[in-house]
Amino acid sequence: MDFVNALILGLVQGLTEFLPISSSAHVRIVGELIGTGADPGAAFTAIIQLGTELAVLVYFWRDVTHIIKQWFLALFGRIPRGDATAKLGWMIIVGSIPIVILGLLFQKDIETTFRSLWIVAIMLIVFAIVLWLADHFGAKTRRVSELTWGHAAIYGLAQSLALIPGVSRSGGTISAGLFMGYQRSAAARYSFLLAMPAVFGSGLYELYKSVKHPCIAGSAEAAAGTCTPEVFNALDTFGATVVAFAVGLLVIAFFMRYISRHSFLPFVIYRIVIGVLLMILLATGVLSA
């Protein structure tokens, strides 16, 4: 992968992370189309997601700092433990547990089997239908302040589906929120806040592995699959992450305004079109799964 291709993938990550169309699927597909020489990889994808998650931190800075402050104050008894904002902090922690457990249990599949473009295409189409059903039939009356422990757990399970490229982290969690009756903006806001621990954790973990245990061709670690394939270098990855942050910040601002007035139908149609097109390219041999 060269520097220009890495910047392109950073641009794709920034454009697609917050839209319910699966950023990991798009990075996977575009990486194949632009001829990086290989699947960019789960590690590269996880690391450049740090850029878009930093955009979430900047955009929701007041929310994040307030939640952290109230959580610590409640933890040490400075405010009532039942404080609504502190409770939201605990719910974000609880909602992050499923993706951590499943991510560790299925790490090898996430890095290999789940990245098949056939799986990506199927997930794009299947979860387009799921998103449409959720948006069409959801009551869209609940606010984030009405979140319950049970709903937090469901949100967490929905987020864990994003381990499969093509599902979409925002698409999965927003769909779950809509099915449970939350407003579009409320479902999206909690979805983005919920993603922060998981994405920062995953990205920093992959960054650590890539620095500490890079694969060297012919080594015992490479043969055993216990190291991180070095298909990218530090400059490429840093550049892609910076681009992902800058573009992601613009996209999240647009998306939060958009969903306050419009449905998710354009994203549903887009997912189906891309999924069908991807299947055609795979069936005709233009792309390899």
Image (tube, rainbow, N blue to C red):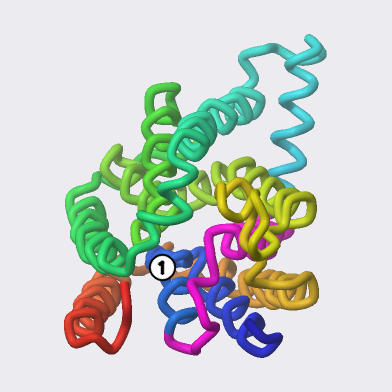
Q: Is 37 on the left or on the right of 112, as rendered?
A: right
Give the residues drawn in magenta, as a range.
33-58
- Note whether 164 is above or below 74 in the view shown: below
**Residue 215 location (% of width, % of height):** 67, 59
Q: Residue at x 61, y 64 (%)?
A: 44
- Note whether 70 is above or below 267 in the view shown: above
Identify which amino acid the numbered label 1 is placed on.
Ala
Quadrant the C terminus occupies? bottom left
Magenta span: helix, strand or loop, mainly?
Answer: helix
| Magenta residue check for 142 | no
Q: Residue at x 74, y 17 (%)?
A: 74
Quadrant the N terminus occupies? bottom right
Task: Residue 106: name its quadrant.
Answer: top left
- Note whether 135 is above or below 7 in the view shown: above
Q: Is residue 60 visible?
A: no
Q: Is residue 175 visible?
A: yes
Q: How many numbered discs sit on the rendered protein? A: 1
**Residue 245 location (% of width, % of height):** 69, 69
Q: Nearer the viewer, residue 96 or 190?
A: 96
Q: Nearer the viewer, residue 166 or 155?
A: 166
Q: Residue at x 52, y 29 (%)?
A: 97
**Residue 242 location (% of width, % of height):** 74, 73
Q: Is 191 on the left or on the right of 268, as rendered?
A: right
Give the crowd class for mark 1: few <14, some 14-19, many >=20 residues within 10 Å. many
Task: Residue 216: name its quadrant.
Answer: bottom right
| Magenta residue check for 48 | yes
Q: Nearer the viewer, residue 76 or 259?
A: 76
Task: Identify the residue under disc 1.
Answer: 25
Q: Residue at x 49, y 30 (%)?
A: 101
- Note whether 96 is above or below 39 in the view shown: above
Describe the element under mark 1 as helix, strand or loop.
helix
**Residue 121 location (% of width, % of height):** 26, 68
